[in-house]
Image: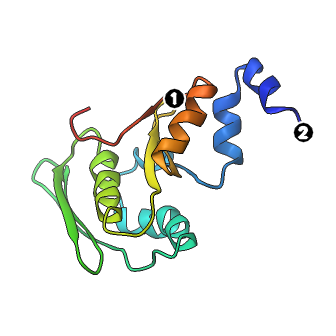
């Protein structure tokens, strides 16, 4: 396998990182097919990474309604034993950010340092690492990361 540095020089380091890391979630295919199923997305992509860290008590509940304009209204709750965060959105352009932000907020009540950090060189990709560690790694290879924030 090529050295990481030579892959960086080729310009393909972002694709290499995402395709080889078991701690990255790429959600691009899911944002174009409403209604979004946050509960199923959580079970398939987020829960396995959390389970590896011993976090198995987080659940996602979702109610989705079609409105009179054929759009969707989402009411999503991310719950754990001691905390619950929720958001309500109506066909917002970015529905993934409030979802991941709520997951990260639930994780603040857990004994782990890892969070889902947005890798902004990609459309909707999140890395599950301790933020202080991943920021340094991404900076070394000229990848950009961003804290999950509703006011981006």
Looking at the image, is 94 positioned above or below residue 43?
Answer: above
Other-residue count near label 2 (Cα within 10 Å), few / some / many at <14 / 14–19 / ≥20: few
Residue holding disc 2: 1
Looking at the image, is 54 positioned above or below residue 128?
Answer: below
Q: What element carries label 1?
A: loop
Does residue 143 appear in this view? yes
Circle count: 2
Marks 2 and 1 sit apart, C-alpha to C-alpha, by 24 Å
Out of 17 and 72, give the one closest to the viewer: 17
The tag earlier along the polypeptide, 2 or 1, is 2
Q: What element carries label 2?
A: loop
User: On the image, which quarter does residue 137 sit in?
Assistant: top right
Does residue 64 appear in this view? no
Residue 70's disc is none
- Name the residue at 28% across, 81% down: 81
Q: List x then y, in percent, for residue 112.
A: 45, 64
- For the C terminus, give its image quadrant: top left
Q: List x then y, in percent, for residue 94.
A: 29, 41
Looking at the image, is 113 positioned above or below residue 77?
Answer: above
- 49 to the left or right of 105: right
- 15 to the left or right of 1: left
Other-residue count near label 1 (Cα within 10 Å), few / some / many at <14 / 14–19 / ≥20: some
- 143 to the left or right of 87: right
- Name the residue at 22% across, 72% down: 83
Out of 109 and 48, give the one closest to the viewer: 109
User: On the image, which quarter does residue 10 sit in?
Assistant: top right
Residue 121's disc is 1
């Amino acid at each position: 396998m090529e050295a990481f540095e030579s892959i960086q020089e080729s310009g393909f380091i972002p694709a290499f990182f995402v395709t080889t890391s078991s701690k990255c979630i790429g959600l691009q295919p899911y944002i174009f097919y409403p209604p979004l199923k946050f509960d199923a997305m959580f079970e398939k992509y987020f829960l396995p990474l959390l389970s590896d860290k011993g976090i198995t008590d987080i659940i996602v509940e979702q109610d989705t309604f079609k409105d009179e304009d054929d759009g969707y209204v989402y009411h999503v709750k991310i719950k754990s034993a001691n905390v619950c965060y929720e958001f309500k959105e109506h066909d917002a352009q970015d529905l993934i950010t409030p979802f991941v932000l709520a997951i990260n907020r639930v994780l603040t009540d857990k004994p782990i340092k890892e969070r889902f950090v947005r890798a902004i060189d990609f459309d909707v990709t999140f890395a599950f690492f301790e933020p202080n560690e991943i920021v340094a790694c991404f900076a070394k290879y000229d990848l950009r990361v961003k804290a999950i924030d509703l006011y981006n």
